Amino acid sequence: MSDTWWRGAAIYQVYPRSFADGNGDGVGDLAGLRARLPYLADLGVNAVWLTPWYPSPLADGGYDVADYRDIEPVFGTLEEAETLIAEAHELGLKIIIDVVPNHSSDQSAWFQEALRDRSKRDRFWFRDEPNDWQSIFGGPAWTQVEDGQWYLHLFAPEQPDFNWDNPEVHQEFHDVLRFWFDRGVDGIRIDSAALCVKSDTAFEDLDEVHDIYRSWRRVADEYDERILVGEVWLPDQERLSRYLRQDEMHTAFNFDFLSCPWDPAALRQVIGRTLDMHATVGAPPTWVLSNHDVARVVTRYGRADTSWANNDRKDGAETNLELGYRRARAAALLAMALPGGVYVYQGEELGLPEVDDIPDELRQDPMWTRSGHTVKGRDGCRVPLPWSGEEPPYGFGAGDTWLPQPEDWRKLTAEAQAADLGSMLNLYRTALRLRREQLGDGTMEWLDLGANVLAFTRDSGLTCVVNLGPSAVELPPGEVVLSSGPLEGDHLPSDTAVWLTS
């Protein structure tokens, strides 16, 4: 694989707790993931991104990191992680891991030292008086400690924010990057990347944050083929592009595309703006339909309002899953045909819906508790995957799962779908294979097939047509390579996508 493999890569996101359980304790782990690596290679992805696997009290699903130089015992050991990296490489899979520069765990050695010794508090944001900032998870963003001072946490109280004015913080993260690059990790996904630098009045996207990622890029460039991927939630595309300059990150998540409603005009605008913005800095775009923080796409696309916003999750909104499933299939072909990289969140290839009916007493997301039980949070997209069998735990492991699986998922297991040529799983397998051969990085040219149709031709000659209107439309000339659903002769039905070659 070339040193620019990341420009057109298909990357599969693994949420370790919910991917596969190798020891039967109901929680996913590295043993389970290692056993399923051939599944991922067969699926056709180029790389695997794992959400945090470090020791953590799990106050926020592992994004409260206590120690970057080890593995959470629930998942396995550092030696096992090194073995996983090697086994993935043998199968042609790159490994990307999460790093969380905005905050620590309140159980980390640094924060525990800060609680004991005021002279060590400059690594975090301690103040005698708090301001009025609110936590992203709800409630105040400050918590008071026993001696009267307050510390900042933009997320949960168990996640104290680092002070990036302190050179020790910079050096610590440089060392962490090298620690994992030395062990063969191919990339770092940077969580909440725009939030690290604070002033007295603001904490998002301050200019000084770019100095951090320029220094990280210099570390990455010490190694061959290592990349930085940013989680950058910004409404301003020009501001986002600054993170992708040639001396900063390699790529960033495209949340405009993820958040966009299933609407032809809106999608065309987002796609065009994305391509234009990335072209200004020479970076490849990425296309993302869902992740571990977002309601699953099958559920979202079946709602009356198909858009997404973090501050309006539409929990429990009525959804037509049959419609959502059809649209999700079409959206998968759209995303995979566009120039650049694409991300697949675990279970997306199985067409899993959001699980809205988790019993309240079993919910674990801090959003649920911090909101006073008004926001259901992200547990519904983190339910453990169904692999095989007719009833829970569907081959996930030997015992009960840490979040309950629906009783009606037997038709959605990987085993059941592998035997069904028309399944979502086989659609993804075929599309990802064709993508490796003909798509990925490159250029595209729009075709005008009407206001309700998105159509474009890639530099390889493959044409993608997506009908988002209420009625079938006539297909352009060409041989059908793949379609998301049945065609009506030479017409493309509503909410269906097709790939053609001339």
Image (cartoon, rainbow, N blue to C red):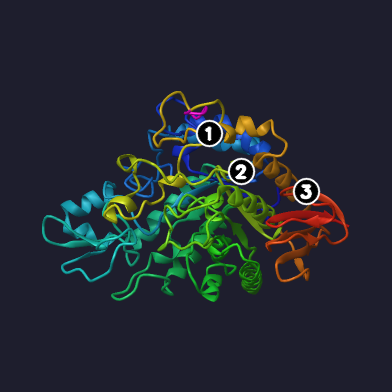
Helix, strand or loop at disc 3?
Answer: strand
Mark 1–mark 3 Cα distance, whole angstroms, equals 26 Å
Residue 106 is tagged as none
> Looking at the image, which is closer to me, 234 or 9?
234
Q: Are marks 3 and 2 in contact (CB under 8 Å)?
A: no
Helix, strand or loop at disc 1?
Answer: loop
Residue under label 2, please give it. 349
**392 above or below 243?**
above
Give, as a three-letter code, the residue at label 2. Glu
Earlier sequence position, callout 3 versus callout 2 = 2
> Looking at the image, which is closer to me, 331 or 4?
331
Residue 386 is tagged as 1
Q: Residues within 10 Å of mark 2 (few under 14, many from 20)?
A: many
Mark 2–mark 1 Cα distance, whole angstroms, equals 12 Å
The majority secondary structure of the magenta stretch comes to loop
Relative image position of residue 146 (x, y in whole percent): 12, 55
Q: Residues within 10 Å of mark 1 (few under 14, many from 20)?
A: many
Residue at 32% x, 51% y is 368
Q: Which residues are magenta?
A: 392-396
